[in-house]
Amino acid sequence: MDRSRLPPDLAAAMVSANQPLDLVAAIDRSRDRLGPFGRPLLFFESTGSTNDVARLLVASADCEGAVVIANEQTAGRGRRGRTWHSPAESGLYVSIVLTPVRAEVDPVRATALLTLAAGVGLVEGIEHGSGLRTDLKWPNDLYVSRRKLGGILAESCETREGAVQVVVGYGINVSLAAYPSELRDRATNLELELGRPIDRHGRYVLAVETLVGLRRRYEDLLAGRFDAILDAWRARAPGNVGACVTWSTPTGSQVGVTAGIDDRGALLVRIDDRVERIVSGELTWS
């Protein structure tokens, strides 16, 4: 990447001297498993949104594999513009630039399955790095015992040359401070589930393991191993079948029962004698 094309603050963040030594060491120990991920790596003690930083990188140059990590986000967001609480020392906030359109088989399908592939890679990385088994909920949430542990936000953007890339951002709650008190009956965190504290070094190790898991499933995606991704996602999604969901349509609210996902990652919901295919939207799960 030509750093001369980047805004000065982003170019400075790419200098390894500005990166925590524990993070650099964790990356170096896993370089063979990370492949091109983390080249370049940008770290911020505080930034508005790691996804926004990654989008600036994409606008400057083709930078597949670039990773942005922050200790704090002041303007973190989730799906549909919701605020993602991201206080310092309490969560894992990461974004990575990917290019699913370069998949060897059916790039359109690969792009459609990117969020599901990322979810599988992240829960596998969390389990490998901490021993905690984590479930998935369509389309982009990480759950433990029916409470939300983290989420994924994928955003498409274009390089200066017009190539399409996708910024995949994810946030994982590490401590109780990661979310406000009013969400404590619906959210959880790694320290609570593991029964032990996780310091900054532990967060860096977890960041690396989630990136390793994501890289492995991204390679599946690029190679057209879609069934492997879908099978792994289904095995991690207990609400994939038999859960009651409600969602809004132009004609009013609909209620149905989940009936799995199709081969492009859309949620299937049974309503009486028909099956609806939901590609996006806001669902309420019972």
Image (cartoon, rainbow, N blue to C red):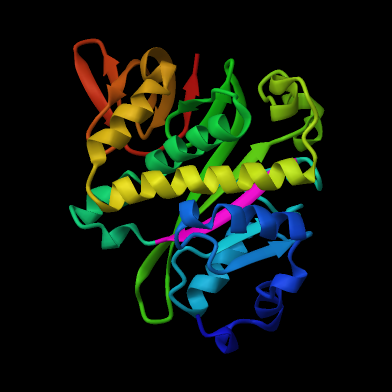
Q: Main secondary structure of the magenta part?
A: strand
- Residue at 47% x, 71% y is 63
- Residue at 74% x, 22% y is 192
Q: Which residues are magenta?
A: 91-98
Q: Residue furthest bottom?
A: 4
Using the rendered image of the protein, determine whether residue 85 is visible from the camera's viewpoint.
Answer: no
- Residue at 75% x, 27% y is 191
Q: Is residue 73 above or below residue 259?
A: below
Instruction: Say left or right for 190 vs 236.
Output: right
Q: Quadrant for residue 3, please give it.
A: bottom right
Q: Quadrant for residue 5, please give it.
A: bottom right
Q: Quadrant for residue 53, please give it.
A: bottom right
- Residue at 60% x, 65% y is 41
Residue 175 sits inside the magenta stretch: no
Residue 95 sits inside the magenta stretch: yes
Q: Is residue 129 above or below residue 246?
A: below
